[in-house]
Image (cartoon, rainbow, N blue to C red):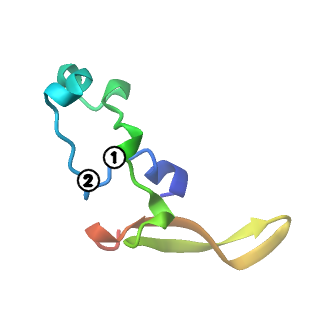
Amino acid sequence: MTEQEAKEKWCPMIRFQIGPDNAAWQGVAYTNRGEEMRPPESVRCIASDCMMWRWSIVGATVNGVYDDNYPVEGYCGLGGKP
């Protein structure tokens, strides 16, 4: 997945408590992953800024020139290679 797609996902290493301190999330705890279940920014994946991020596809056109070393897509190394 691209870095931007990853940054919309919940990081599996983050723990988030739904309770009195976070009352805004109590009503969406049981919904089915709709837009309202989008994780707060503080618990989202940080993609290539994370030590576990792994690049899987390299090679892209950058400024009109093909660069074989330019990273394009990656994955969370915590779950193993996709």
CA separation, marks 1 and 2?
6 Å
Characterize the local packing of mark 2: few (<14), some (14-19) or many (20 or more) Cα atoms within 10 angstroms: few
Q: Is residue 16 left or right of residue 38?
A: left
Q: Is residue 46 visible?
A: yes
Q: Residue at x 37, y 44 (%)?
A: 42
| Badge number at residue 43 | 1
Q: Is residue 4 left or right of residue 79?
A: right
| Secondary element type, mark 2 | loop
Dots 1, 2 in contact, CB < 8 A: yes
Q: Is residue 16 left or right of residue 56?
A: left
Which image quadrant: the C terminus? bottom left
Quadrant of res 34: top left
Characterize the local packing of mark 1: few (<14), some (14-19) or many (20 or more) Cα atoms within 10 angstroms: some
Taking depth in this image into account, of 8 and 72 the one nearest to the observer is 8
> In the image, is residue 47 above or below residue 69?
above
| Secondary element type, mark 1 | helix
Q: Residue at x 76, y 67 (%)?
A: 61
Residue 15: image x %, image y %? Answer: 20, 49
Amino acid residing under circle 1: Val
Residue 21: image x %, image y %? Answer: 19, 29
| Badge number at residue 63 | none
Total marks in image: 2
Taking depth in this image into account, of 29 and 43 the one nearest to the observer is 43
Quadrant of res 52: bottom left
Q: Residue at x 43, y 44 (%)?
A: 8
Q: Is residue 30 visible?
A: no
Residue 5: image x %, image y %? Answer: 48, 49
Read off the residue under disc 2. Answer: 14
Q: Identify the residue at the far top of this view.
A: 27
Q: Identify the residue at the far front of this view.
A: 21
**N-term mark: 1 or 2:** 2
